[in-house]
Amino acid sequence: MPRLIESCTRRLHCGYRNEDTGSKGDAVWGHIAPDRSTLDEQLSGLIAELTEGGWEIKSVTPLTASYYYAASQYSVSLDRTNWGGYGVGYGAPYTEGLVVMAQRWVEITEAQQAERDRERAQRQAVETAAALEAKREQRQGELARLTAEPVAKAGLLRDKWRFRSQDYPTEALAQGAKDAALKALRERPL
């Protein structure tokens, strides 16, 4: 029987606790800590659920966050102004959650594999047809631009004819160059 790998991702959000440790005037400082009890509960529940379904945990990625503070200038009196500050609280991020990626092997029947192969072949055929149609439309646009490009007289003192920034001594040669470019574009394989 054929085997496939299925994968799933789950995101756990544990929240945080703001533990203020001091203050002075308008300023308050402290630290942010993840809510470990919530995180432990969610993680143990997810592990039980994944184990029951036959999943293997392949990676656990922490999601970090950080808080900042900002204060601006404000007037205390006519002659006195307080300036503010901006910072990230000692630059210490905290874990706000986790992303857990798990995989498992799934055995499928030959009929299911044949159905998957048929769907894949059908998808590839549709993509190939769409790519071919896009190339055809692109070629039609190139042909329209080339057809609209003029063979123009370019000389003041002597007769010159210009096509695609190339000068030709006669109009017939310039038109021949345009016809050759059109023919080459039409015959170029998609």
Image (cartoon, grey):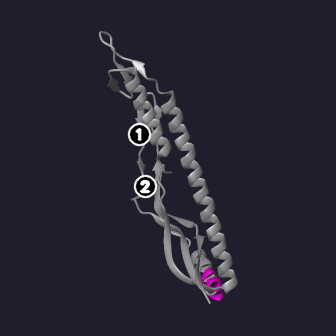
Magenta-colored stretch includes residue 48? yes
Magenta stretch, residue numbers = 46-53
- Name the residue: 41% across, 30% down: 176
Q: Position of residue 169 (x, y in %)?
A: 32, 21
Q: CA distance from mark 2 to mark 1?
A: 17 Å
In front of the other: 87 or 135: 135
Q: Pinpoint residue 108: horizontal percent, then vertical percent.
A: 65, 85
At mark 2, the secondary structure is loop
Q: Nearer the viewer, residue 103 or 11?
A: 103
> Would residue 136 be visible to someone looking at this image?
yes
Magenta highlight: main SS: helix
Residue 131 on the magenta span:
no
Residue found 57% across the figure and 53% down from its top: 132
For disc 2, the marked residue is 88
For mark 1, give the secondary structure.
Answer: loop
Q: Residue at x 68, y 81 (%)?
A: 112
Q: Residue at x 62, y 70 (%)?
A: 120
Residue under label 1, please give it: 83
Question: Marks 2 and 1: CB-CB under 8 Å?
Answer: no
Q: Is residue 141 above or below residue 53?
A: above
- State left or right for residue 72 relative to residue 168: right
Report the amino acid beneath label 2: Val
Label 2: few (<14), some (14–19) or many (≥20) C-alpha neighbours in 10 Å: few
Q: Is residue 134 left or right of residue 163?
A: right
Q: Quadrant of residue 130?
A: bottom right
Judged from this view, the residue extending furthest toward the bottom is: 1
Residue 134 is situated, as x and y percent measured from the top left of the image, at: 57, 48
Q: Is residue 55 visible?
A: no
